[in-house]
């Protein structure tokens, strides 16, 4: 694909030049990064309209996945041009396949977490409720704060898997508990370098209660509701309201309301 392209739109031409040299591409260069993506999209559409073939690459990730490219793809499609994805290494799928984490069979990719501590904690709290694996990206200068936030927000026992420099020369993968993350990072100064992908295990499922335990739970909840209602209503009205709120049968609720009313101390 790169050999046959007339133009290559690249996030950093100095980095991507190594790849084009290796594949002996003679394509011309066009800069397309987060600061000029809108104007680059217009130029690329003009080239496509002129019958030119344009390849879009980014430094170390997939275009439009936490990298520039979404505006370019949208503009090309809007102009009626075909967009052909060329599958390649994916840090998200690479870590997912090597994580060993189990969930409900699903996973979600949340990109980069917010940089501000409060917003980051709120985002982690929401993500931490997922029944599927959650995967996020993180930059090296924020990885220490993020690992500390994961441990504090989701608890030190939450399993996580860290992927550093995935699919590249200094790739490193570590499976540990969230509370171990800061210590693992501090153990080697080189771990402060390189881009990170983090897989967070799903929330642990609630233990299933046995039939007797479930009955006790229902009775306890019903009693608490009835006692609250009986403080303001006679047993018959309290029972009818409780039946509507809980969906329980009259033969279950009304006798219990009467028993609680009789047992209540007189004023």
Image (cartoon, rainbow, N blue to C red):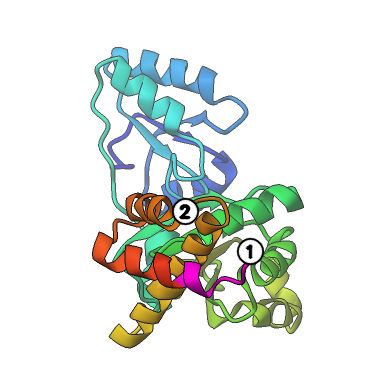
Q: Which residues are magenta?
A: 260-267
- Count of all numbered marks drawn on residues in the image: 2
Picture residue at 23% right of the left edge, 27% below the top: 82
For residue 189, side relative to residue 33 (left or right): right
Q: Dot 1: what SS? A: loop
Q: Is residue 207 visible to us here?
A: no
**Residue named by callout 2:** 234
Residue placed farthest to the front in the image?
Answer: 266
Quadrant (top left/top right/bottom left/bottom right) for the N terminus = top left
Task: Tell me residue 196's x, y (percent).
Answer: 58, 63
The part of the image, by quadrant, that contains residue 198 is: bottom right
Picture residue at 27% right of the left edge, 31% below the top: 83
- How far, Cα to Cα, is label 2 from label 1? 68 Å
**Residue named by callout 1:** 194
| Depicted 210 relative to depicted 123: above or below | below
Q: Dot 2: what SS? A: loop
Q: Is residue 93 visible to us here?
A: yes
| Depicted 125 relative to depicted 147: above or below | above
Q: Nearer the viewer, residue 70 or 260?
A: 260
Picture residue at 33% right of the left edge, 87% below the top: 212
Task: Tell me residue 192's x, y (percent).
Answer: 72, 69
The part of the image, by quadrant, that contains residue 77 is: top left
Picture residue at 63% right of the left edge, 74% below the top: 155
Q: Nearer the viewer, residue 195 or 215?
A: 215
Task: Tell me residue 152's x, y (percent).
Answer: 70, 69
């Amino acid at each position: 694909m790169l050999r046959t392209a007339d133009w290559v739109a690249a996030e950093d031409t100095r980095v991507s030049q190594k790849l084009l040299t290796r594949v002996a591409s003679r394509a011309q260069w066009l800069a397309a990064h987060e600061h000029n993506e809108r104007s680059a999209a217009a130029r690329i559409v003009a080239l496509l309209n002129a019958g030119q073939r344009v390849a879009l690459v980014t430094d170390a990730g997939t275009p439009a996945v936490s990298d520039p490219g979404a505006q370019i793809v949208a503009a090309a499609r809007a102009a009626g041009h075909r967009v052909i994805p060329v599958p390649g290494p994916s840090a998200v799928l690479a870590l997912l396949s090597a994580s060993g984490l189990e969930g409900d069979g699903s996973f979600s990719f949340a990109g980069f977490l917010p940089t501000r501590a409060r917003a980051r904690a709120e985002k982690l709290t929401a993500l931490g409720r997922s029944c599927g694996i959650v995967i996020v990206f993180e930059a090296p200068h924020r990885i220490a704060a993020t690992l500390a936030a994961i441990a504090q927000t989701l608890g030190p026992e939450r399993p996580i898997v860290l992927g550093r420099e995935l699919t590249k020369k200094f790739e490193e993968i570590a499976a540990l508990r969230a509370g171990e993350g800061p210590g693992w990072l501090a153990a080697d100064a080189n771990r402060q370098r390189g881009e990170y992908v983090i897989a967070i295990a799903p929330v642990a499922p609630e233990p299933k209660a046995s039939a007797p335990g479930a009955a006790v739970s229902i009775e306890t909840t019903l009693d608490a509701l009835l006692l609250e209602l009986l403080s303001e209503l006679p047993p018959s009205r309290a029972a009818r309201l409780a039946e509507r709120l809980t969906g329980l049968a009259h033969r279950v609720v009304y006798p219990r309301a009467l028993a609680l009313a009789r047992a209540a101390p007189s004023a």
